[in-house]
Amino acid sequence: MAENNTTGTFLDGYRTEAGIQRLHGTKRFKKTDEKSRIIRRNKEAARIANYRKLQDTVFTGYEKNLYNNETFKFTTKLLNWNPELYTVWNYRRDILINSKFPGMNIDQKHNFLEQELRFVLVQLKSFPKCYWIWNHRKWCLKEDLRADYDLEMNLINMFFQVDERNFHAWGYRMFIADCIKDSKQTEEDRMNLYQKEFVFTTRMIKRNISNYSAWHRRSVLVDLLINTNAKLPKIIDDPKQELYRNAFNQKDKAEFLRLEYEVFLNAIYTDPDNSSVWIYGKWLFSDSFYDDMDFNFGNSFLDQAYGAVNELAELEREDMTGKENQWCIKFNLYLLKFKFVRYRKCGDINKYPEFLKSKFAELKKKLIKIDNMRKQRYLDFSLESA
């Protein structure tokens, strides 16, 4: 596949935003006169008529199950005009399966699909957040027995240089990683791939902690790495990563939690209004780690987190002249409830401290006061609620 563009070449034609935002910073031109407007409208009317005619032609072929070179060219032309027509992508795949692929050997099919991937890339650069285009690219790779997944990884990195938070690109990266994993012979090799992906999420989060997709991908990888029997090899000279590797190899959830707590703490203190970090924090302080953990040790860790978030809330009040940070309140409410649930699971619900119940009620009142539109939601949220 010949897509090893340099970054500069890749950026050509890439559209990061659509709609009104693209108007900012754009030079304004004088309003055209009536004659010019009429000419422009007539041209647009002609284009619309041509588009509708082409669309009717393609959909007629689709309804009649016409699979040939002519209908394939029509889909190409229509998708160049509007690549967000998912039915046309479906039709295009039917044409390939019924008309193009039969009679091709592996090499011929690979060469043809390379051309198809180039066509798809052009569409992705114009519509990088269109599901149907990404889906078609995945399908092409599944059909190609000689697909170059390493090259696809490089392509994703180019997309990330333009928009590192594009969740479509992140989903595609997960797909490519799984394809590479399936080609590995041993569990050790497969998990080592995921270890590299974990390191990648670390790098992306350091670059931008607002990357929700990176946080989500990280949580998925941790579940895989900490529950495998494979031994992970050393892959980079990084003392912190070595600690993570040892925690994964020893299945030490408490040690992982200690390491990741530092990452979480640094993130919330860097940007206390960043929702992606708080959502990740709820996963971090959940049954995924605490079910197998010593009860008292788990509670001490929850207390530590509660204290740190409470301290952050005080700093936020000082910085914002008395205004409360909702995320701090919501997270501490979550921690108090999670701790209550742990007591209930152990059959020691009566031992849950009364002062924590009072604190829970106090935080709820604060939240209702500053976010009254969601009052009923907060009233329904209790220690005993599901």
Image (cartoon, rainbow, N blue to C red):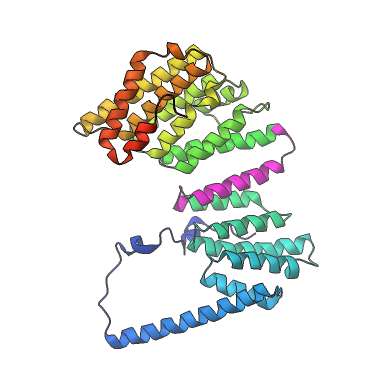
Residue visible at 47% across and 21% down in the picture = 341
Question: In the image, what residue occupies the spot 32% across and 37% down?
Answer: 375
Left/right placement of residue 31 relative to residue 71 reads left
Relative vertical location of residue 278 with respect to residue 252 in this rendering, above or below: below
Quarter of the image holding residue 16?
bottom left
Quadrant position of residue 364: top left
Where in the figure is residue 83, as x and y percent of width and height? 54, 66
Residue drawn 54% across the image and 71% down it: 80
Q: Nearer the viewer, residue 28 or 338?
A: 338
The magenta stretch is 161-187
Q: Nearer the viewer, residue 50 or 240?
A: 50
Left or right, residue 162 beside residue 69 = left
Q: Is residue 235 visible?
A: no
* Image quadrant assignment for residue 39: bottom left
Where's residue 269, x and y in %? 34, 30
Query: Magenta span: helix, strand or loop, mainly?
Result: helix
